[in-house]
Image: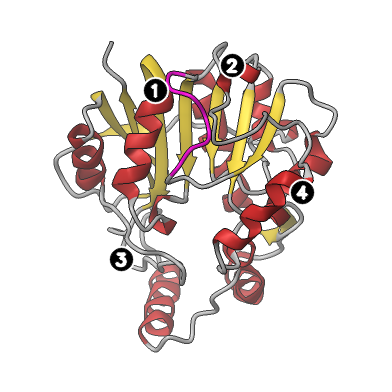
Amino acid sequence: MSGFVSARVKRPLTMLPRAFQKSDTLHNTDYASVTEVSGTKVSGEQIARMYTRYRFAAELARGGPVLEVACGSGQGLGCFAKHARLVCGLDIDMGLLRIAQRTYGGRGNIMLVNGNAHEIPYKDASFDTVVLFEALYYLKEPAVFIAEAKRVLRANGTLLMCTANREIPDFNPSPFSYRYFSASELCFLVRSAGFRGVCVFGDCPVPAPSLKSRACSRLKRAAIRMRVMPRTMKGKEFLKRVFMGPLVAMPEDISRENVPYAEPRAIPCDRTDATHKVVFVKADKPI
């Protein structure tokens, strides 16, 4: 495994040694407060969305080494580990990585690394697949991450990203976000970096409007406009209970859940899509 590691990192991690704790100082943002951390109370729809994105990615990433950037508390790493010989989870937040370590400490093919998406600490051509889920909007320089992903991918390797769809009517941006990309902008971003075979997919269809959904949407838009929408996952729990019913704890390893699966649907790259809550982009590094 040492062949994957850049000179910027002393060695790959199956544990989180003291040498990497210095990266705690790289940011002052409490990403855990806006992240679906293991144990957080969430809706069934949130669990279904998470399961879908990791199963979709795992089916694309069978066999070769996989890197998940911004892996958070690592709920999806187990999905990759079922089929990939090596899975690396990278995150800037040491607290989130410690949660992942408690879940996967005994798994020999899962490594956890504290690092920055703008400077991925691996050698060129190390991975067959790089994924970034629901985090592109937190990056100050997304084009730098795209270039880094391309660098660490092998020829014909795959980059897969997903993001909340800003085009839906009651879209609520994260308080720590820089910018959200539409489907067409995601395509432009990866093509500009030299990726080929670009495809876009939509997940979590927006349901047909009903009296209740229209009322909820109006209330949500008003709360966003008046800036009274809770900023953290914890703060949103009460509203979710009111509008979505009982909540459940986010599992530590989503691969253990028995969740209905519907593969994300291909959508056009060159037009606005307001019919899905989540947008994926898949792109391949040229040979």
The amino acid pointed to by label 1 is Thr
Most extreme residue toward the left, as rendered?
270
Could you say which is closer to the camera, residue 107 or residue 169? Answer: 107
Which is nearer the N-term, disc 4 or disc 1?
4
| Disc 2 and disc 3 in contact, CB within 8 angstroms | no
Q: Residues within 10 Å of mark 3 (few under 14, many from 20)?
A: some
Numbered disc in front, either 4 or 1: 4
Q: Is residue 131 above or below residue 2?
A: below
Q: Position of residue 166 (x, y in %)?
A: 32, 59
State the separation of the CA atoms marked 1 and 3.
31 Å
Which mark is on residue 169? 3
Q: Which residue does the numbered mark 4 point to in the structure image? A: 98
196 in relation to 9, above or below = above
Q: Which residue, given by chain and number where applicable, does mark 1 sit on? A: 158
Image: 82 above or below 96:
above
Q: Is residue 148 toward the left or the right of residue 187 in the image?
A: right
Quick one: label 1 or label 2, which is nearer the N terminus? Answer: 2
